[in-house]
Image (cartoon, grey):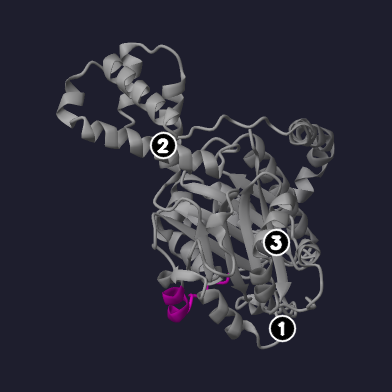
């Protein structure tokens, strides 16, 4: 199994460089916000390990909200964020990326402060990397190659059934039809028209780190439990004191901002989502958010790693990244459907989970005991997200037209081909996937 990883490169822009940079990034797209896979600067489509990537000119239009807490707003320089999700280690992927697209990346990052002409670009990017505090992968181990090969398999089977006559196929017994499809796939593989690569072995270092993490976090929680139990009355008191005394902010996003976001969305069955905002001030909110992201990262790594984030199954990848000395949080995801359905999914299925982390951000609807209210206030929740959402200048998707449900279906089709004998009922269920 090849595990996935993510990277977030973030650097401030030179003064007054944002508009010129946006013009350059626009030259990488084939339609608003959607990357041309073969653009001259960063040909994403030639990078076989890359699932998703984006460039975002990161601004902080909501930074002034913290003044409601009696805190002077911290300055935020307009910055460039480069995010990606890839197969295998991000370190080696970035090296591959620089080797393949170094000149284009140097033009893009040349708008950032501190990159001199002769400087080692890879070293500069690594210095500006921000680790994710939590990272979600829809299906750990599902590679770009696997996705593409399994989609090609699905399409080949559909074409074969159509060429053979759908009415004829429907009259065949399930086991007979399955055998015919098995012979067809075998012929196509021998002819080199279909490839189904075997799964790569899981890297031993990742396996050991993952096992240590799986055991270490519960053990740490067990050791912390007595202290948390003793401190729980004080923590509960402090939580409710914050929840009831925090300024109750409710700002509407500017129509022009929403229009700009909308112009970049619904270009495909999948969409991108990037939000950026300030954490509520004070150590209590800082350590609450840090602790909850630590727990969330454990959950996404060991529990929600097979197609579901709690009850939501439309997300391909997501990450939560602290920036600016943990005073601000960047969240980015790749998901299926419209932004409205995306937000509704969380409201209806996992509002409590969204509240846990995002209620520590300025402007979020008030929660009670961290888990109730909050996102349940639908319109305020949606206004808050839209207001904090950032336009994504360039977004790359390695498998446009495919949803997370499609990827799972294609994987099940392949598994049905590769398993041994089936009963008539099992064959009928497998054929229903086609």
Mark count: 3
Give the position of the N terminus as an image quadrant.
top right
Task: Tell me what residue is drawn at x 56 percent, y 55 percent.
Answer: 46
User: Is residue 254 covered in magenta?
Assistant: yes
Label 2 or label 3, whichever comes before in sequence order: 3
Residue sitting at x 48%, y 34%: 195
On screen, residue 333 above or below 425:
below
Residue labelled with disc 2: 193
**Can you see residue 241?**
yes
Mark sitting earlier along the chain (3/1): 1
Instruction: Work out whether 248 lies above or below 192.
Output: below
Q: Which region shows up in magenta?
A: 248-260
Residue 160 coordinates in the image, percent (x, y): 28, 33
Sort mark 1 into few (<14), some (14-19) or many (20+) by Cα contacts within 10 Å: some
Q: Position of residue 107 (x, y in %)?
A: 66, 76
| Label 3 – label 1 distance at C-alpha | 22 Å
Callout 3: few (<14), some (14-19), or many (20+) C-alpha neighbours within 10 Å? some
Is residue 316 shown above or below 264? above
Depth check, front residue: 357 or 266: 266
Residue with the mark numbered 3: 98
Judged by depth in the image, the label closer to the viewer, 2 or 1, is 2
Tag 2 and tag 3, C-beta contact below 8 Å: no
Q: Does the magenta portion include 221? A: no
Query: How far from the left and from the top, in percent, is residue 130?
Result: 74, 60
Residue mark closest to the camera, 2 vs 3 = 2
Question: Which residue appears at 47% of the width and 43% of the height?
Answer: 148
Asked which secondary structure carries label 2, the reply is loop
Quarter-of-image position of residue 68: bottom right
Sequence order check, earlier mark of 2 and 1: 1
The CA distance from mark 2 to mark 1 is: 50 Å
333 and 415: which one is in front?
Answer: 415
Q: Which residue is mark 1?
A: 14
């Amino acid at each position: 199994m090849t595990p996935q990883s993510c990277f977030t490169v973030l650097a401030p822009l030179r003064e007054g460089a944002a508009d010129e940079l946006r013009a350059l990034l626009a030259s990488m797209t084939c339609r608003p916000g959607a990357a041309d896979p073969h653009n001259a600067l960063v040909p994403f489509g030639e990078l076989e390990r890359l699932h998703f990537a984006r460039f975002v000119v990161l601004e902080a239009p909501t930074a002034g909200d913290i003044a409601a807490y009696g805190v002077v707003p911290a300055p935020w320089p307009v910055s460039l964020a480069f995010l990606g999700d890839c197969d295998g280690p991000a370190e080696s992927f970035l090296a591959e990326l620089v080797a393949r697209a170094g000149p284009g990346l140097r033009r893009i990052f040349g708008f950032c402060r501190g990159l001199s002409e002769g400087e080692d670009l890879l070293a500069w990017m690594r210095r500006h990397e921000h680790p994710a505090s939590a990272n979600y992968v829809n299906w750990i181990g599902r590679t770009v190659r696997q996705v593409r090969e399994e989609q090609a398999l699905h399409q080949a089977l559909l074409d074969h059934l159509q060429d053979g006559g759908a009415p004829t196929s429907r009259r065949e017994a399930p086991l007979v039809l399955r055998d015919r499809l098995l012979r067809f796939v075998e012929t196509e593989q021998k002819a080199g028209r279909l490839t189904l690569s075997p799964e790569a072995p899981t890297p031993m270092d990742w396996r050991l780190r993952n096992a240590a993490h799986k055991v270490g976090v519960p053990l740490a929680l067990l050791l912390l439990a007595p202290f948390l139990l003793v401190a729980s009355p004080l923590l509960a008191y402090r939580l409710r004191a914050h929840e009831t005394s925090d300024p109750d902010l409710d700002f509407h996003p500017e129509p022009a901002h929403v229009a700009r976001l909308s112009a970049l969305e619904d270009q495909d069955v999948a969409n991108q989502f990037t939000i950026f905002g300030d954490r509520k001030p004070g150590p209590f909110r800082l350590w609450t958010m840090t602790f909850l992201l630590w727990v969330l990262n454990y959950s996404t790594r060991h529990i929600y790693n097979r197609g579901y984030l709690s009850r939501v199954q439309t997300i391909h990848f997501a990450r939560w990244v602290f920036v600016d000395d943990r005073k601000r949080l960047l969240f980015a995801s790749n998901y299926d459907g419209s932004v409205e359905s995306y937000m509704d999914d969380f409201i209806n299925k996992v509002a409590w989970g969204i509240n846990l982390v995002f209620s520590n951000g300025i402007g979020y609807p008030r929660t009670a005991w961290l888990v109730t209210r909050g996102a349940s206030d639908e319109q305020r929740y949606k206004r808050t997200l839209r207001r904090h959402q950032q336009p994504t200048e360039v977004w790359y998707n390695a498998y446009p037209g495919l949803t997370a449900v499609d990827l799972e279906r294609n994987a099940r089709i392949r598994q049905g081909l590769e398993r041994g004998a089936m009963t008539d009922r099992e064959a009928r269920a497998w054929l229903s996937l086609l």
